[in-house]
Image (cartoon, rainbow, N blue to C red):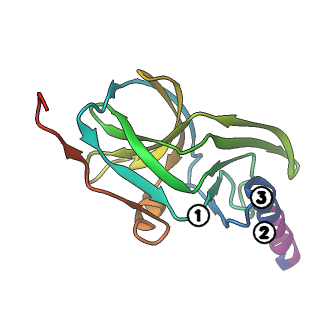
Amino acid sequence: MIFRMRAAFGVAMMVGAILSGTGAKAQTSMSLSPVQSEDRVVTAAQGANGTLTFNEPEVWLDGDGLVRTTTRGIRLPAGDYQLEAEDADYLYYRAPERFEMRVFQDGQVKDGRFMTGGVYVSKALIALVPAGVYFSSDEKNKTLVWKLGSDFMRSEGSKWTRTKVTRSAPGQ
């Protein structure tokens, strides 16, 4: 049993290393599947400024290496994510470069692609889905593709930071 657990953990870490290519530590997302596909219509964050910054690339996997097999992963690049849009529930921060999504089968990369988008963060203090990753098809349409839970929010200040959103007065 211990050998099986170590082997599963080893596979999860190998998948994380393959996905990151940067030495970033892989993290699992939420106890349920983090993968989602929800289309949202947004408005440009005109007159609003804000930045979310990752200190280093972050890798998230949908499996834990023990019970759930890893089938998908996502790598967010390090750098400054600029506030670009908002809707009633979330603020949308565009990544400094495309993020990477991969699909795994039997511990091997089956499919991978780079996508334009970034990180969304809930406007509410308490939210069922406090943050996640979105794909941007254009400036008015975002597709939420990955949920990040409270573990992500707890890492604010150590793995990532954000500035307070400021808004300029109308007409300036």
* Label 3, residues with CA under 10 Å away: few <14, some 14-19, many ≥20: few
Visible residue check, residue 9: yes
Q: Residue at x 23, y 35 (%)?
A: 47
Q: Earlier in the sequence, mark 3 or mark 1?
A: 3
Where, by quadrant of the figure, is residue 100 drawn? top right
Q: Residue furthest bottom?
A: 2
Q: Position of residue 169 (x, y in %)?
A: 11, 36
Three-letter amino acid code of the residue under disc 3:
Gly
Q: Position of residue 39 (x, y in %)?
A: 47, 24
Q: Which residue is mark 3?
A: 21
Q: Which residue is mark 2?
A: 9
Q: Where is 73 relative to 157, above or below?
A: above
* Label 1, residues with CA under 10 Å away: few <14, some 14-19, many ≥20: some
Q: What secondary structure is the stretch in magenta mostly built from?
A: helix
Q: Earlier in the sequence, mark 3 or mark 2?
A: 2
Q: Earlier in the sequence, mark 2 or mark 1?
A: 2
Task: From the viewer's perspective, tell me whether residue 13 is left or right of residue 88.
Answer: right
Q: Which residue is mark 1?
A: 56
Visible residue check, residue 30: no
Three-letter amino acid code of the residue under disc 2:
Phe
